[in-house]
Amino acid sequence: MAESRRYISQTELENHKKTGDLWISIQGKIYDVTEWSHDHPGGPLPLLNLAGQDATDAFVAYHPGIAWQYLDKFFTGYYLKDYSVSEVSKDYRKLAAELSKMGLFEKKGHVTCITLCFIALLFCISVYGVLCCNSAWVHLCSGGLMGFLWIQSGWIGHDSGHYVVMSNRKLNRFAQILTGNCLAGISIAWWKWTHNAHHIACNSLDFDPDLQHMPFFTVSSKFFQSLTSYFYERKMNFDSVTRFLVSYQHLTYYPVMCFARINLFTQSFLLLLSKRKVPNRGQEILGILVFWTWYPLLVSCLPNCGERVMFVVASFSVTGIQHIQFCLNHFSSSVYIGPPSGNNWFEKQTDGTLNILCSSWMDWFYGGLQFQIEHHLFPKLPRCHLRKISPFVKELCNKHNLAYNSASFWKANVMTIKTLRSAALQARDFTIAVPKNLVWDAVNTHG
C-alpha cells in the first residue's frame, strides 16, 4: 500500500527561517538546508533570505540542471499544503527549460577569450606608456587605459562569478583571481557575497546591499526611517551628517562615482580581514597583494608627484563609468522594504530593474548589463545570448502585464539624477527629526 504523504502548512514552513533552522520549498517538497548552508557555494545568505517559503523560481535561476539530483538528501518527507504555481512562474520555468534544451547555458561563445586578449593589450599599452614615454599626455592616456582595463576585467569577474567562463572550474577560479583580485584589486569573494544578495533581494531597501550607500546616497525617503540593513547587520542611521550629504547627492553623484573604487578596495579588505567565513581566503589575500604590489610600483615609475596623481585620478575616473553603469540599472527602479519573496520572485526582478538600449556593436562596453532584466532572470546564461533571448522575456512580460523597462544610456542617467534629486529635496525637510550632530549644526549656523 502506497505511503500517504505528510503535509505542512505555509505558516508552519515560515517557522523555519532563522539561522540554525532553514527550510525551503521547491516544487512543493520541503527541504532542510540548515547544514547545507555552511557549504552552499552561494553562501548562507541566499538560503536565509528565502527560507520559510517556496524558492522554486530562484532555484531554477541559479542552479544548473544537474543540481536537482542532489535535492533528495535534504528532503524532510514533508510536502507543502495547498501548493500552487502562478501563471507567471509556469511561463518562466517553461522558458528556462526551453533555453536549457537549446543548450544556451553551455554555449559560452568567445567573449571571454576576446576580452582577456583585450585586457592584455590594454595592460601592455598602459605599462609601455608609463615606462617608455616621457610625455605627460601619454601618461594621462595610460591612466585612462588602465581604467578601461579595470572595466573589462570587471565584466570577466562578473561573468565568472555567475557561471564557468573557462573550460573547467579550476581555470574559472584562476580567471576570477586574475581579473578581480590581481588586476583590479577587488576581492572576488566580496563581490560574490554582495552580488548574490543583490540578485536574491533585488531593490529591497533593507536586504539589497547595492542600494545601501548611506551616508552618501539614498534612492528613497524610506531610508530616512533609519532602516536596519539585514545584509550588513547594522542600523543605517539617518543622522545630521547623512542628511547634509544626501541633500546634495544629485550634485555629488558623478564626482563620487569617479572615486567609488576606493569603497570597493575598502570593502574587500574589511571582508578578508574579518572573522567571517571566506572561501579560499589565502588565494584572495594573495591576489589582492599582487595588485597592491604592481599598481603602486607602476605609479612610482612616473617622473613626479603631479603625474602620479594624474595617472591615479585618470584610472579611477575612467573606471567610474562602470560604477555609473551599475547604478543606472536599479537606482531609478521600484524599491520595497522587506525580505525577498519566492512567490513573486519574477515580478520583483523585472520591477526593480532597468535595461539600457544600445546597438549590438556596443555590447562590449556594457558587459551584458544593458540586458539587466534578462540577466537577473537568467543569471547563469552567458552574456553573448542575452540579446537573443530578450524578445522572449519581453513577450512574457507583456503577456502578464509586467514591467519591462528600458531607456537609453543618457535617459537612464537623467532618471537616476531625478531619483537622487527627489530624495535630496525630501532630506532637506526639517520636519523629519534626526539625531543632533555638531557638524550639521556648524555648517548651518547663521549670524
Image (cartoon, grey):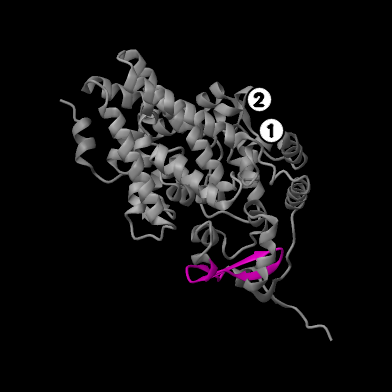
Q: Which residues are magenta?
A: 15-36
Disc on res. 279: none
Residue count near mark 2 (Cα–Cα under 10 Å), binned few <14, some 14–19, many ≥20: few
Please tell me whether mark 2 sits on a helix, a strand or a loop.
helix
Vertical order, 22 against 185 (above or below): below
Q: Is residue 30 left or right of residue 186?
A: right
Q: The disc labelled 1 sits on which kind of residue?
A: Arg
- Which residue was labeled with disc 2? 360
At 21% from the left and 37% from the top, the residue drawn is: 439
For the C terminus, give its image quadrant: top left
**Which mark is first along the chain, 1 or 2?**
2
C-alpha separation, residue under disc 2 versus residue under disc 1: 8 Å
C-beta proximity under 8 Å, tags 2 and 1: yes
Disc on res. 387: 1
Q: Is residue 306 left or right of residue 399?
A: left
Using the image as rendered, state which of residue 418 and residue 114 is in the foreground: 114
Observer able to see residue 363: yes
Using the image as rendered, state which of residue 135 and residue 376 is in the foreground: 135
At 40% from the left and 41% from the top, the residue drawn is: 182
For the N terminus, give its image quadrant: bottom right
Residue 152: give x, y in percent of width and height: 50, 32
Indicate the quadrant where residue 368 lies. top right
Please identify the residue farthest to the front as the structure is shown: 132
